[in-house]
Image (spheres, grey):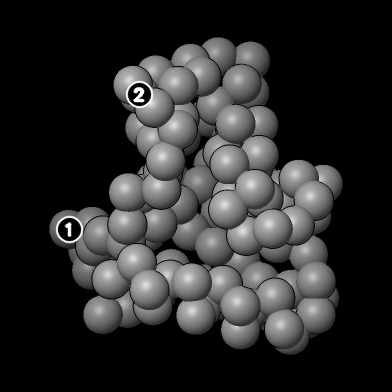
Amino acid sequence: MKSPLQAQAGGARLRVRVQPGAGDNRVAGVELDAAGEAYLKVRVTQPAEGGKANRAVAKLLAKTLHMPASSIEVVAGHKDRRKTLAVAGGPEVAERIELWLGALT
């Protein structure tokens, strides 16, 4: 399966699909869209207004990956369900996320 993760200098980029207003906060796995692109599906209870859902996604992923929330930032798709997140850190961050993603599938 394709990966929603792309390693880059200084960390990684992660493609996510967010379901705001969900019943709970959780990572629901990796899925492919109609074009075959992989996304990490994330559900958050916060509504999609005023950036609340974006902050909830960053906080949830930071907690899940055991890193500070300040190291995760939405860099594309601020008002869309599909977003690209930048995860700051060295090459070990991308490796750690790739291992975690492998455990989800």
Residue 91 visible, this angle? yes
Task: Give the spatial CA distance, label 2 vs label 1.
Answer: 23 Å
For residue 66, the mark is none
Viewer-proximal residue, 91 or 49? Answer: 91
Q: Residue at x 74, y 85 (%)?
A: 91
Q: Point out the tag, 2 or 1, that comes first from the N-terminus.
A: 2
Residue 40 falls in image quadrant: bottom left
Q: Is residue 102 shown left or right of residue 83?
A: left
Rendered image: mark on residue 34 = 1
Residue 22 - label: 2
Residue 96 vs residue 75, the one in the foreground: 96
- Judge left or right: residue 58 versus residue 47: right
- Residue 81 visible from this viewpoint: no
Q: Residue at x 48, y 72 (%)?
A: 100
Question: Considering depth in this image, is 48 or 90 the residue closer to the camera?
Answer: 90
Binning the other alpha carbons within 10 Å of mark 2 as few (below 14), some (14 to 19) or many (20 upward) gives some
Count neighbours of disc 1 (C-alpha within 10 A) and say few if under 14, some if 14 to 19, many if 20 or more: few
Horizontal side of 65 relative to 46 (left or right) equals right
Name the outermost residue toward the left. 34
